[in-house]
Image (cartoon, rainbow, N blue to C red):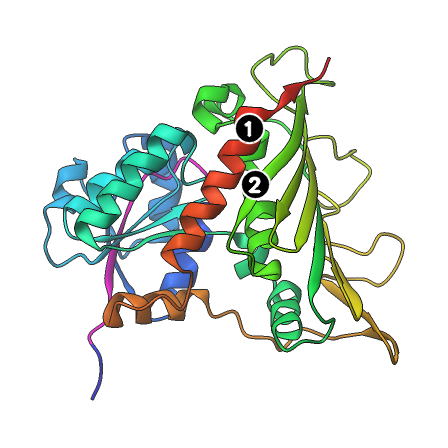
Amino acid sequence: MTQEPIRFAVIGINHGHIYAHVALLLEAGAEFVAYYAPEDDLAKTFSDNFPQAKRVATEDEILEDTSIQLVASASIASERAPLGARVMRHGKDFLADKPAITTRAQLDEVRQAQRETAQIFSIYYSVRFGNRAVQKAGDLVHAGAIGHVVQTLGLGPHRLGVNRPDWFYEKDKYGGILVDIGSHQADQFLYFTGTKTASVVRSHVRNIANPDHPGLEDFGETMLVGDKCTGYFRVDWLTPDGLPVYGDERLMILGTEGYIEIRLICDIAGRPGKPHLFLVDGKGTHYIPTEDVPLTFGSNLLNDIRNRTETAMTQEHAFMTAELSIQAEEQAIVLP
């Protein structure tokens, strides 16, 4: 029997990641029916890319449409969680760009709305769900290829570039660097270690290279501890212009019987293309091709909507990732 497609809409297109979200949902077989965006300039480009979706005049037109099952959003970061609570209370599931939650008060609100409604509040972490090497690393780790995971080490450098919107430089809008970029690394720590308990040991933030934007944190680092595991990550907006990609992102996963290194975006002065996965174990060193690894987040999420399951991401993982990154930002020592 052929299944009816999941109908979805978009509210908020302030970050370019929304294009990838729509594309993955369409590829998985969902039907894009409507979007709301008050910004005419953003809406023009978005509509040119997705002409099948109707632009509506108000958010309520989407929230009150009972035929829509899922709402996706890449609105201003601080507006995503409140929107998610409204979406869930209108009987719809929600997919947010990261960071989906920027404050502890928002986390409490979203947890409460999710408990009341049993709707899905999901977060798309492109560094994991959109990277074939990271997907393959997950398969290897969970199959025991490196034994018990002892530590994750994540590096998330980015290039600041130009033409950023004003809200990008306002901490109360983007949440701080450990909430924004750092949420990727918190997600990786929880996923690869499998820990059910985690806390922040120490964290630092600073603005070292952008005095014209005092609200911007351009460097951050955090040390985490979990159940028989630890984690460290560094994130920044300091990628030099000489690198041909936005940042030399890396992930190392240390186990009791080996380790994995992933060069997510490039292998500087090495192999061309991206990404690159290396495994070291008791038998030697291995370079593992990942071109054919499937990316399954979109199809898993649509199946979760149909079956009320948690195969794309558990609800607790989504909230725990947000809580860790928020805790890191709250506890951060501001360095000069």
* Magenta residue span: 4-16
Q: Which residue lies furthest to the bottom in this view?
A: 1
Identity, as a three-letter code, of the amino acid under mark 1: Glu
> Relative to the observer, which residue lies in front, 133 or 39?
133
Q: In which quarter of the image is the C terminus?
A: top right
Task: Give the residue pinned by disc 1.
Answer: 329
Q: Which mark is nearer the camera, 1 or 2? A: 2
The answer to which quarter of the image holds residue 133 is bottom right
Identity, as a three-letter code, of the amino acid under mark 2: Ser
Could you tell me what secondary structure mostly forms the magenta stretch?
loop
Mark 1 to mark 2: distance in Å? 12 Å
Q: Which residue lies furthest to the front in this view?
A: 228
Q: In which quarter of the image is the N terminus?
A: bottom left
> Relative to the observer, which residue lies in front, 252 or 275?
252
In percent of width and height, residue 67 lies at 12, 59
Packing grade of label 1 (10 A; few <14, some 14-19, many >=20) is many
The answer to which quarter of the image holds residue 74 is top left
**Residue at image point 72% right, 46% down:** 245
Residue 235 falls left or right of residue 75: right
> Relative to the observer, which residue lies in front, 242 or 64?
64
Task: Give the residue pinned by disc 2.
Answer: 199
